[in-house]
Amino acid sequence: MRSGRSVGLRTAHVRQLKLTSTVLKTGLTPSASGSAYFELDPGPSSSPPSASTIPSRSSLKLTCTVHGPKPLPRSAPFSPQLILSTNVKYAPFAARQRRGFIRDAREKDLSAHLESALRGVIIADRWPKSGVDVVVTVLEAEEDGWWADEFDLGQSTRRTNFGEWGMMTVLAGCITAASAALVEAGIDCVDLVSGGVAGLVRSKSGTSVVLDPCPSEHEDLVAGCVVGHLASRDELVEIWSRGDNEDQAITLVDHAVDAAIAARGVLASVVKETTALRFGVASTDSEDTAMT
Amino acid sequence: MMVAPGEVLGKASPLLAAGRGAYVNPHNQTIYASITGRRHVIHSPDNNNKRVVQVVGHKARGAVPEPGSIVIARVTKVMPRMASADIMCVGPKSVREKFTGTIRQQDVRATEIDKVDMHLSFRPGDIVRALVLSLGDARAYFLSTAKNELGVVSAESIAGATMVPISWTEMQCPLTGQIEKRKVAKAS
């Protein structure tokens, strides 16, 4: 149960290129048949240190557990295939805005997106009359923007689209973590699925595409796109795009795929390394687990 | 060799097939891994020239009954037209979760299937060896004991002793000598 770290790309303030480290661990919940912990740490901030104790940006931390395959409840109708159910829940303390204990519309939305992504990757007919539950708990969520923007403190001009950008990073993390947990649970999948995000950032000099956007660092995020990507088949199982992409939809998807491929490197090495440890063999292919 | 889902294991051909933990993509006739684990190439059990590539995962995945598999089940309820049983083992593997099976009246034995009396074939608590006929309905798998080697393998008498089979329809209690009716499995 070691973590793999790899280098992803995260551009801050449009031109500055920075690195994000991804942490992925599997097998943290002994009672679940598969589990994974995913963390996206943006590293040291590029913005000047402020007097405020509130961090200028956030990171992403989430856990995913997979329960099953187990027999369907008696009330369920007959199914010749594996029935997948997903549940994404933010911890009450996950973001600046406190969440209730009941799932709200955004969390249900994320669950639906995660389900559609995983549905395309599992081989459901290998497990007839069975069900599997994928439960994601978001411990720390990416903020939807810089906190001060909410109160119009930091800038003279209020941001026009203070939207739900943080959800996109959360979804990409959910997809990657769920893939690791499903593999840990031994559920047949056609491929590993990894999530990636790209965003379109507008600045005075025009628009540019960033991988893995950090909503609190970009002044004006106009569009975003999340993909669930199967690298060995070069297929997409999930696309979620929002905002005004200014006819750059294809570019946005291409960049989101690039981000997903970066995440897949971590995913594949962690999954194989963990399995090798279970077999009691020292991993031989750890050269792709770069440390940041 | 350690593989992860999506890794290529080989090209599907008349001489190479996908086994457990692998699948064939029909678009390019290529075999991919579907779980993580070690890659093994074994001889096909039915054709010596053919090879099967399979992936063995790190943990014994909980067995799931599928049509054609032989299961060991414990009878829980006997009704006039069928008996319910909890499946405990699929082949040599124990199941982790609870799967229920149903032995219908017509599936108890191969002959005179309309004259079967369920109460003279099974009792709650009996351990039976059965064949999985189908995935069944929403609740239970359909099981069959209509073969010589299928049926009750272990049963307790009313006195509480494990009974000894004396014919394919009878078992005897070693304590009281009482004979009880069962659909007895032929000892293998």
Image (tube, rainbow, N blue to C red):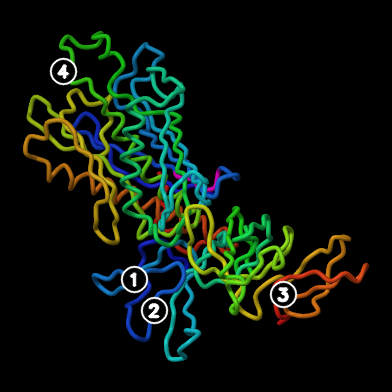
Read off the residue under disc 2.
Answer: B17
Q: Chain ID for label 4? A: A
Q: Secondary structure at mark 3?
A: loop
Task: Confirm whether circles 3 and 4 share one chain.
Answer: no
Task: Confirm whether circles 3 and 2 share one chain.
Answer: yes
Which of discs 1 and 3 lies nearer the camera? The answer is 3
Segment colored magenta: A24-28
Residue A26 located within the stretch drawn in magenta: yes
Q: Chain ID for label 3? A: B
Residue contact between numbered discs 2 and 1, judged by CB atoms under 8 Å? yes
Q: Secondary structure at mark 1?
A: strand
Q: Residue B155, how many percent across, how many down?
A: 78, 66
Read off the residue under disc 3.
Answer: B184
Q: Residue B128, how many percent across, how many down?
A: 68, 67
Of the residues shown, which amino acid type is indicated by label 4?
A: Thr
Q: Secondary structure at mark 2?
A: strand
C-alpha span from label 4 to label 2: 58 Å
Q: Earlier in the sequence, mark 1 or mark 3?
A: 1
Q: Chain ID for label 2? A: B
Which of discs 4 and 2 lies nearer the camera? The answer is 2
The image quarter in which residue B120 lies: bottom right
